Amino acid sequence: MASEAAKPVSSRAFDAHHPPAQEIMDKCVHCGFCLPVCPTYVLWHEEMDSPRGRIYLMRMAQEGTAQMNSEWVGHFDACLGCMACMPACPSGVDYGKLIEATRAQIGRNYSRSLAEKFHRRLLFETLARPDRLNLLRWPLLAYQNSGARALFRSAGLLKLLPRFVSSMDALLPKLRNGTELAELTPAQGEKRKRVGLLLGCVQRVFFSEVNAATARVLAAEGYEVVAPRQQSCCGALLVHAGEEEQAQQLARATIDAFERANVDYIISNAAGCGSSIKEYSHLLRDDPAYAERAKRFAAKCRDITELLVECPPRAARKPIRARAAFHDSCHLQHAQGVRAQPRSLLAQIPGLELFELPESAICCGSAGIYNLVQPEAANELGDRKASFIAPLQPSVVVTGNPGCVLQLRAALERAKHPLPVLHTIQLLDASIRGASLESLV
């Protein structure tokens, strides 16, 4: 469908297939409320690297007064898509739909260099393919455990390789032997609901302990948990990067898998995935076979913290005596509007002191594949976040997204202030099980 409609319109840079919506752009009154929360504007103070500046560039491309050249595209590549501008906007501009539409236009109408095309395709064909990521576990385990990683770092060999290789090395977590989650985890006590668990890609392969903790907590709170074997990537990384058609294919497969599972809710524990699946009705709005199904699917989607605060807790919480700094994931607080719920759950843990970070609205620099395609800007933002964490002297950092976990761990390591960075659900699970913080790291 997209290929037939994707034809240039007169002298405009955009084609006719869903360009950035004029009615959304017209809502922007260029007031500037978005500027203090936009990460790239905070870093560079460049108007065209702010939300209102990018909307101006969209408008120019739509009117045919700007070309889709490398400079124009660069301002959109620099955008993290963190959505911090949306809650800050008094006019209600849905910038998320604008940036995703623009990136889809760039994907169809702008020719990147061969090196850039290869880099992006490599990322999409690995990070969005849990089967391939799983195959990578073994060589990566050998790379870490054999001493090769330490040798490469100490000898400066990574500097001889393309920059994205060193960026990936910096973000690589300490790998453990993963455990596959059972397809069905029965509820403890009287069953409240039957829920489906979205396993994710990076989450499933590199943070299987987070999925295991999620299933245990849900079961302890009376939920029967189904983790469909057939589920693949949900398409979040692809839709955020403008790879519309592939994202749609993955969305359809995800809907199929969870419809067969016959669940009351679909639960996500990765903020980027959660924000994407909640927008399936928009992604598949032109598909007559899936448009209504996507609406029904999206209505069932919840972040794990949203679901858990809906009912009184059943399982007793045991003390965890620790100082926890809480980092808001952008796609949880801005895109999904979930901010109070994780704090409410953490407040249930006896002995846990919770500390807020300055500039909580500003991204840590993870943002999907951003820290792999824009490593310099991502590192600046990660270092900024680490500089706020260190003075609090926490014993643990808590967040709700695997990308944020990787980004914050790397930034704290660069700052010579390494700390455990955990998912919210891991602390809650440890409290219910009576496990220590040390057992999680």
Image (cartoon, rainbow, N blue to C red):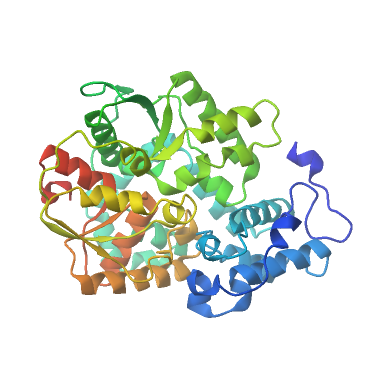
- Judge from the rendering whether residue 86 lies leftward or rightward of residue 348; answer left or right: right
Residue nearest the viewer, comparing 277 with 6:
277
Task: Locate the N terminus by quadrant.
Answer: top right
- Judge from the rendering whether residue 301 lies leftward or rightward of residue 86; answer left or right: left
Q: Examine the rendered structure and indicate whether residue 240 appears above or below residue 419.
A: above
Q: Residue furthest right?
A: 10
Would you identify the image quadrant in which residue 262 lies? top left
Is residue 162 something that shows in the picture?
no
Residue nearest the viewer, comparing 104 with 25:
25
Residue 44 percent location from the top left of the image: 52, 79
Would you identify the image quadrant in which residue 251 lies? top right
Residue 336 percent location from the top left of the image: 47, 49
Total numbered labels: 0
- Judge from the rendering whether residue 82 lies leftward or rightward of residue 202; answer left or right: right
Q: Examine the rendered structure and indicate whether residue 177 appears above or below residue 414.
A: above
Is residue 166 something that shows in the picture?
yes
Residue 385 percent location from the top left of the image: 34, 69
Residue nearest the viewer, comparing 160 with 63:
63
